[in-house]
Image (tube, helix red, strand yellow):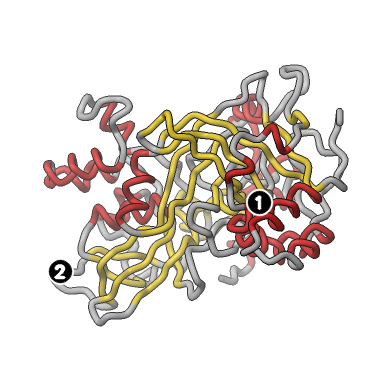
Amino acid sequence: MIMQGPTMANILRMTAIIGSILLISACSERLTDTPSKTRQAHWLISKQFLDLPGWTQDHQGEALSAFLKSCPVLVSRAAPILHFELKEAVDWRTTCAKAAQIDARDKLGSRLFFETWFQPYLVVVNDAKDGLFTGYFEAELRGSRTPDETFKYPLHGVPNDLISVDLGRFDDNLRGRRVVGRVESGHMVPYPSRADIQKGLLANKAKVLAWVDDPIDAFLLHVQGSGRVMLRDGGILRIGYAGNNGHSYVSIGRALVKKGELLAGRAGWVQIRRWLEENSGKTDFLLAANPRYIFFREIANEGPIGAQGVALTPRRSIAVDARYIPLGAPLWLDTAWPGDSDRPLQRLMVAQDTGSAIKGPIRGDFFWGFGKEALKEAGRMKSRGNYFILIPKSTQVAGS
């Protein structure tokens, strides 16, 4: 959208003000999130592949196929330097070129590729090596291109009045921060919340990609970020994340626990859906507790698209906090199977996505794919564990 004269000037002035406010208000958060070498002895501890629990039992070729999807993005630009102790940006060109020569169906050959070209490092924070791992999946909904009495819940595209400003373009200290809003009377103001949008405040400002038959499924799609809509004419519409209204994400599960409606530790999606179905008159009220609203776009790829811009691979793609783990990096995951703490879930993953709730150096969201089984596993996954990041051997790491 093109702005003229005074309107753009006002936006820039407002951006500077908002940037200053964000910088001040974010100071305590930055002190928490940004690694400080005075607060921990190590961030990356060099290991051998035999130190990776279950390494020889995995089929690394499945992860190799996922890694190859990331390679075009990785080689197109230098990978960002980690908050960890890398002395230089990672050069993925040689590694990706070698990966392209391996037949991913060759289990032993794939394993030897990673052992030859990568060095594993255990991720440790303040001497603690474990973190939380949850799961997500590709939602499946029933819908139509046109609304009627059955299909009446919209999935919106990006509104034509939504403005997203990269504050890093105005101040390097604000790199990675963004403010979202719209212009009213020459001033930038916050975009409407979910509650406002549910009341119809989008009007004709956003294209409706599809109408679905279940508000709970629609909300779940907002949480998952991508999914497939099974159209009543027999077609399939794949949609992915395109933007949001700039409001913070709030877990409705936590809201229900806080109100005493659900028990802590038993507030997964299965329990939330059951509560919503039993309290249908409170659906809009509860969903509005999460002010963040997601806008979508149509996609034509083989699967849902992650934050790196590549198709996700079921059970091999993982969402991470990209402030700490570079997208495209292989990670050896060591955690437990959902609902069975005695059953190890150990496999090679590729960091290809992010999420608003995925915060911290040791935090992951396991992509299970789509379908009822994926929904079941993702909904109950809340496991403690750790991961090892695989860094090309050509990259110099501080202290190694």
Q: Is residue 30 left or right of residue 338?
A: right
Image quadrant where residue 124 sits: top right
Q: Amino acid at mark 1?
A: Leu
Give the alpha-carbon distance from disc 2 to disc 1, as whole Å. Answer: 40 Å
SS at circle 2: loop
Which amino acid, by three-letter code, is at mark 2? Thr
- The answer to which of 251 and 2 lies nearer the viewer is 251
Residue 213 position in % (x across, y down)? 20, 64
The residue tagged 1 is 327
Q: Is residue 83 visible?
A: no
Q: Are marks 2 and 1 in contact (CB under 8 Å)?
A: no
The answer to whether residue 361 is seen in the rendering is yes
> Which is more toward the observer, 258 or 269?
269
Tag of residue 132: none
The residue at the point 32 percent across, 62 percent down is 140
Determine whether 211 is above or below 42 in the image.
below
Residue 64 picture quarter: bottom right
Q: Secondary structure at mark 1?
A: loop
Foreground label between 2 and 1: 1
Going 86% across and 31% down the picture, which residue do you hit?
Answer: 400
